[in-house]
């Protein structure tokens, strides 16, 4: 049981990303057109040069025709896919493998989600007809289960943990304030974060990512062709994905202080990329900060922090935009919201900018390797994606 | 006008057939301090503004029929290969992967306790916040469910619970009954 990986065999040669937010003026088709057009311009290609498309969306449409009809594509294969919150990243992974196989020369991975039109608070899902016995916890409630478990296991006072979680939200808003594409572009004082209205457990409204609309796209080709399109391609070093078996949902062994699926996927991606010490070797990461305790636990699951030490690294500023290992330098889900199909590609867009030295006032000094990560589901029962990219 | 009469005679076998919980037991746990407006709300007499979330969907009859013993009797399954308990019952064991080697096991009266919990202010409920918990059972097995008849302030990790068959919600005219947990009586 292993994955061979495609380290340095596939390049990203163009990207586009819309502004995320309450895009009342745009439908899913408009957002797709904007992201695809920007991505093609960035790779200096016409859209008819693209051989095949992978389209990620969870609830904003069905089938590849969501894209082919919007762009009026002529006889192009468009694969529509969904893998919960990793939907956008899965578009990248499947598109990358398609060019690596030689089946296509130039492909697009694109994702979109139009969440605001429903008027609902938070994310909603739709279930097939069922027996009515499913748990009725919302997403913030399930992820809030991490906080008391972490506090108890590592002897962190709950008030102290609240400071840690608030600092994560504060840091991501500081980063997002510098990003013209973010939904929320203001720094938020830490006291305001701590005092925000309760949503679930220890989580206040500022511990939760926003709800927004957005789209992002990437153009991929085999590495040997990359310089036809750009002087500064970025290369895929590792891609890992797992669909969890929900063991933590059934078994009393699971203690809600880790995501075993993330441990497995990050290890696999590091192995593909030849990373032995992620704390030292990963220059920056865009991780799935759906709720603040998630980001804390991810730091330990990905090996950026020792077990039980992540909260100290957060408080020491290790993951700040100007810290030694910036996490969510673009502002994260916290500042962008989480249009599900687009988020993984939005994360990759920040890697694209950072590795090419185009991130403006967010620019990290000379980054070598970047990581993107999504997880979808709930603690104990989730999917996880990890990519490593570099120059 | 016709009349049907039914005469029931109690025999000594009644002792063996008594439910594990008596009428007195249920009477003793009644809650009579419910605010009147909550009563009206619960009875559907007093309208209230729903949260900006989708309404719950009604349960569908075929899947409810397939999972009747789980839904109505809280019957899970135990793996005969590795002893792992599953709620709801599974065909594949989450621990050892064995397929179709699981036996039914009722956990409706098995002692259980809070493994971890949260107060959910966002979830749909006639009585927000929803108190939700991950519940671990003596002898194995775990489920996530709502707590009921509970003061949110008294919930803590390790709180002893028992399962209770309740109406979760009514949607499109269908009352959806399933199990919640409540503090042990």
Image (cartoon, rainbow, N blue to C red):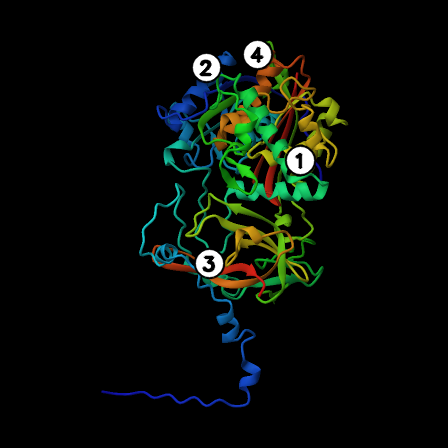
Q: Position of residue A238 (x, y in %)?
A: 67, 27
Disc 2 vs disc 3: Cβ atoms closer than 8 Å?
A: no
In this view of the protein, which residue sits in the foreground, B76 or B154? B154
Q: Element at badge 2?
A: loop
What element does badge 3 sit on? helix
Could you tell me which secondary element the residue under label 4 belongs to?
helix
* For discs 4 and 3, the disc positioned in front in the rendered view: 4
3D distance between C-alphas at marks 4 and 3: 55 Å
Gap in angstroms between the C-alphas marked 1 and 3: 34 Å
Q: Image height check: is B24 above or below A183? A: below
| Residue where numbered disc 1 is placed | A265
Which residue is outermost to the top? A231
Instruction: Say which label, 4 or 2, has the lower sequence index.
Output: 2
The answer to which of marks 2 and 1 sits earlier in the sequence is: 2
> What is the CA distance from the residue labelled 4 to the residue labelled 2?
31 Å
Q: What chain does mark 4 sit on?
A: A
Q: Along the polypeptide, which appears first: circle 4 or circle 1?
A: 1
Discs 4 and 3 share one subunit:
no
């Amino acid at each position: 049981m292993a994955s061979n990986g495609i380290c340095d065999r596939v390049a990203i040669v163009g990207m586009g990303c819309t502004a995320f937010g309450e895009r009342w003026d745009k439908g899913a088709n408009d957002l797709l057109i904007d992201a695809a057009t920007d991505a093609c311009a960035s790779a200096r290609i016409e859209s008819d040069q693209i051989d095949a498309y992978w389209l990620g969306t969870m609830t904003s449409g069905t089938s590849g025709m969501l894209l082919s009809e919007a762009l009026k594509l002529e006889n192009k294969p468009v694969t529509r896919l969904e893998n919960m919150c990793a939907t956008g990243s899965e578009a990248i992974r499947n598109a990358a493998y398609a060019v690596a196989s030689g089946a296509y020369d130039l492909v697009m991975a694109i994702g979109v989600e139009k969440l605001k039109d429903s008027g609902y608070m938070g994310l909603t899902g739709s279930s097939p007809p069922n027996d009515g016995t499913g748990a009725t916890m919302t997403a913030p409630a399930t992820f809030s289960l991490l906080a008391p478990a972490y506090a108890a296991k590592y002897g962190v006072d709950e008030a102290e943990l609240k400071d840690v979680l608030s600092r994560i939200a504060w840091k991501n808003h500081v980063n997002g304030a510098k990003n013209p594409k973010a939904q929320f572009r203001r720094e938020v004082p830490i006291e305001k974060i701590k005092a925000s209205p309760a949503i679930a457990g220890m989580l206040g409204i500022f511990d939760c990512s926003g709800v927004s609309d957005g789209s992002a796209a990437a153009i991929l080709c085999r590495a040997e062709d990359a310089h036809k399109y750009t002087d500064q391609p970025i290369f895929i070093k590792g891609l890992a994905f797992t669909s969890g078996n929900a063991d933590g949902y059934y078994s009393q062994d699971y203690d809600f202080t880790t995501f075993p699926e993330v441990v497995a996927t990050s290890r696999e991606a590091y192995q593909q990329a030849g990373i032995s010490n992620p704390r030292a070797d990963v220059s920056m990461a865009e991780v799935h900060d759906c709720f603040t305790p998630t980001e804390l636990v991810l730091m330990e699951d990905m090996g950026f922090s020792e077990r039980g030490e992540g909260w100290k690294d957060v408080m020491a500023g290790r993951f700040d935009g100007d810290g030694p290992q910036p996490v969510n330098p673009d502002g994260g889900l916290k500042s962008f919201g989480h249009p599900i199909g687009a988020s993984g590609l939005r994360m990759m867009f920040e890697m694209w900018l950072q590795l090419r030295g185009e991130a403006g006032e967010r620019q990290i000094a000379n980054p070598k390797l970047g990581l993107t990560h999504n997880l979808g589901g709930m603690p104990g029962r989730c999917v996880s994606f990890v990519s490593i990219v570099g120059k | 006008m016709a009349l049907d009469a039914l005469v029931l005679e109690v025999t000594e076998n009644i002792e063996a057939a008594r439910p594990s919980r008596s009428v007195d037991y249920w009477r003793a746990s009644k809650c009579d301090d419910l605010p009147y407006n909550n009563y009206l709300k619960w009875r559907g007499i007093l309208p209230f503004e729903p949260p900006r979330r989708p309404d719950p969907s009604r349960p569908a009859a075929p899947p409810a029929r397939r999972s009747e013993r789980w839904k109505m009797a809280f019957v899970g399954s135990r793996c005969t290969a590795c002893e792992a308990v599953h709620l709801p019952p599974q065909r594949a064991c989450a621990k050892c992967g064995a397929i179709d080697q699981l036996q039914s096991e009722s956990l409706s009266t098995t002692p259980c306790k809070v493994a971890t919990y949260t107060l959910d202010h966002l979830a749909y409920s006639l009585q927000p916040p929803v108190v939700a918990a991950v519940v671990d059972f003596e002898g194995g097995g775990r489920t996530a469910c709502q707590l009921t008849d509970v003061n949110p302030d008294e919930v803590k990790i390790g709180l002893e619970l028992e399962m209770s068959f309740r109406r979760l919600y009514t949607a499109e005219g269908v009352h959806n009954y399933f199990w919640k947990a409540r503090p042990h009586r």
